[in-house]
Amino acid sequence: MATNAYVPHAAGYVDNEGVKIVSSRFPYEDSYTLERSLATGGYEGMKKALRMAPADVAALVKDAVLLGRGGAGFPAGVKWGFMPPVWPRYLVVNGDESEPGTYKDRLLMERDPHQLIEGCIIACYALGLNTCFLYVRGEMPVAQERIAQALNDAYDAGLVGKNIDGTDVSIDIVLHWGAGAYIVGEETALIESLEGNRGMPRLKPPFFPAAKGLYLKPTIVNNVETLANLPWLMINGSEEYKKYGSERSPGTRMLAISGHVKRPGVYEVEQGKVSFRDLFYGENYCGGITDDNDLKMFIPGGGSAPWFFEEQLDVLLEASEVGPAGSMLGSGAIVVMDETTDAVRACLRVVRFFARESCGKCTPCREGTTWEEKVLQRILDGHGRPEDIDLLLEIGANISPGVYPVAAHPDSGLEAVPFPPKQTTICPLGPSSVAPITSAIRRFRSEFEAKIANGSASEETHELSGTSA
Amino acid sequence: MSRLNEENVALAHEIISRYPRKKSALIPLLHVAQEQEGHVTNEAMEHLAELVGVTPAEVLGTASFYEMFKFEPQGKYMVNICTNISCQLVGGEELLHHAEKTLGVRPGGTTEDGMFTLEDVECMAACTEAPCLQVNYRHEYRLDNSDFDKLIADLRAGNRPEIPDHGTLGAVRQHIPADRMAGIESPETAGTPAWFASRTAQSN
Ligand SMILES: Cc1cc2nc3c(=O)[nH]c(=O)nc-3n(C[C@H](O)[C@H](O)[C@H](O)COP(=O)(O)O)c2cc1C
Ligand code: SF4
Ligand code: FES
């Protein structure tokens, strides 16, 4: 297959050169079938794992430094080690992908469900548990269908369920699906939802899922992409795995680059080897900014991440580089905005998302995000007040006290404040709403001021006709 | 008559059997109810309460948290347009405005002929394919206004038979044959899997 080719049946995926750990089957049109999976080494990693002792499988994953791909980037092997010796215990797979800008778990579920199922069995085996729930976002019926079919086929073929591959090992994987709520992606909310409740996060501590999760039993929640790495890792071993990526972040990431670039797409990229500049301008990747415009800003890791600018273009794509630079690689969601972008309008759109998706459990988040949205909307509409900029920062400080993470800006003597922010709330959703506000105001304060000064003189309003539910 | 029909009661029992606690089946069961009627009715919620052993208020409590559950009749096709950041940058809001004008409804509204309900929604994990929308949660990518008009015309003309009416999610369901199931136990009684105990002992 030629480099840099869009793969029509895997909308958005770009097949370029380089190692493919999780997307190797994407170029096949029938990549989601059991036949294709088995013809290309599917379930071999699982079979190898079943011949090893469970503890040795867990040790291999720990040695590989497999960082979680759901957002926080915590090493899977270390998290697995937090489980107390208590049974029953559960594995819950987080397929709720809904962070703005994120598009990779849906592809992994739709294009290679058997790889994910195989990864689940490997994890269940290492953790010594026999019940796994695969939670797929409600608005993804195609992923649900593909996984349902794959599970049915795998059960029939003896690859899941009772006596897997003729051994004594028996593990069930149950497909579960949600019904629309971003917050359910947060792991304790996911567990609440899986218990049949409103998807509101639990206060941690004491409810760290590894100790008290589903039904208050030890539970590991892992992201789809994290688990999709396991088959390759089992077959090739941790030494081979660590040959790719960087020392602190081995392996690859599935990165979605959207917005103002010439070739938006989902690329599997080695961690820590490529910079944002390579990604945006490289011929092998996005091929430049739309219409050769200037870059204004970019979001390096999903709507929750503080913004980066020109000065951060040479930061390498790995969590340990992006964090100290003032943001996060998060869910691998990179949104590029060129010089034509209205900073206030973009800021409002991201904030509005958090206002709509706040679960309402904590006051600073429930009230604060709504207030932030209203103030930003009136600035954009030409009804802003001079004190609104400080008001926005003050509301933000109620949700996230102290200095909010920010990227360096040498011209104004601003040093980077590393991620993560502090929080007065139960979960990080509230503080996430502060990221676009502090990012935009610190860098483009004059745009806010101009909108406020021009007041109702501004010729157009951008009010969205949508309901703010 | 909008309790679950006979076929769906059987399906409900099968779904419930896959969970260690019955209430865990609630969201999938609400989808079954919505699939049957196009929206979730009070009678269906009362029925689900009986099936999983909670009160109807608890069922409503759960259902009302989630955006996909609708408590009133909807259009045959739910047209959800993404206006979140990646889509906004390349025309998602303009597409929504075009849709409002074309369909003559605001977000949340249903056309008079009952064909379309319009919604403006959050990121649908297709950000590189922006601007995008979903029809009954099936994605359509990189649309301009004329693509939108064609889509609506096709739906009206019945040219998109692969898209089921609102309410139906996956057309394929998981089914575990009884003799293939490892066995789902209640969290109160389940213990360490025998294979784990023996394999761990062997390796020590
Ligand atoms: C508001 C919020 C939303 C989240 N959404 C997701 C999500 O959609 N998918 C996901 O895998 N993790 C999401 N996470 C992270 C999960 O809480 C959890 O850290 C992750 O699933 C763990 O998997 P990993 O260790 O394999 O990355 C979210 C976290 C927060 C605070
Ligand atoms: S921070 Fe917001 S979303 Fe998170 S628990 Fe509190 S109210 Fe809910
Ligand atoms: S922002 Fe529209 S699909 Fe993600």
Image (cartoon, rainbow, N blue to C red):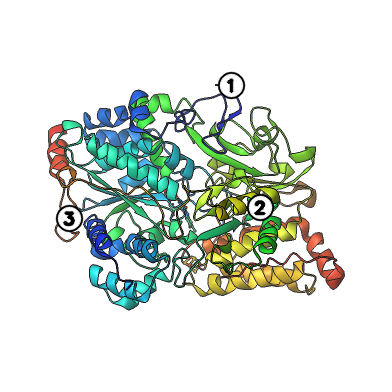
**Quadrant (top left, top right, bottom left, bottom right) of the C terminus of chain A:** bottom right
Identify the residue under disc 2. Answer: B149
Residue B185 shows which numbered tag? Answer: 3
Q: Position of residue A313 (x, y in %)?
A: 69, 39
In the displayed structure image, the side of residue A3 where residue A53 appears, left or right: left
Residue B133 vertical position relative to residue A399 in the rendered view, above or below: above
Identify which amino acid the numbered label 1 is placed on. Answer: Ala
Camera sees residue B83: yes
Tell me if the residue at label 1 has its CB under 8 Å from ligand 3: no
- How far apart are labels 3 and 1 at the CA level? 50 Å
Q: Position of residue B158 (x, y in %)?
A: 52, 52
Judged by depth in the image, the label closer to the viewer, 1 or 2, is 2
* Badge 2: chain ID: B
In the displayed structure image, the side of residue A438 where residue A152 appears, left or right: left
Write the residue at 52% across / 46% down. A331
Assign a secondary structure to mark 2: helix
Pointer 3 with pointer 2, Cβ within 8 A: no
Residue A121 vertical position relative to residue B5 in the rendered view, above or below: above
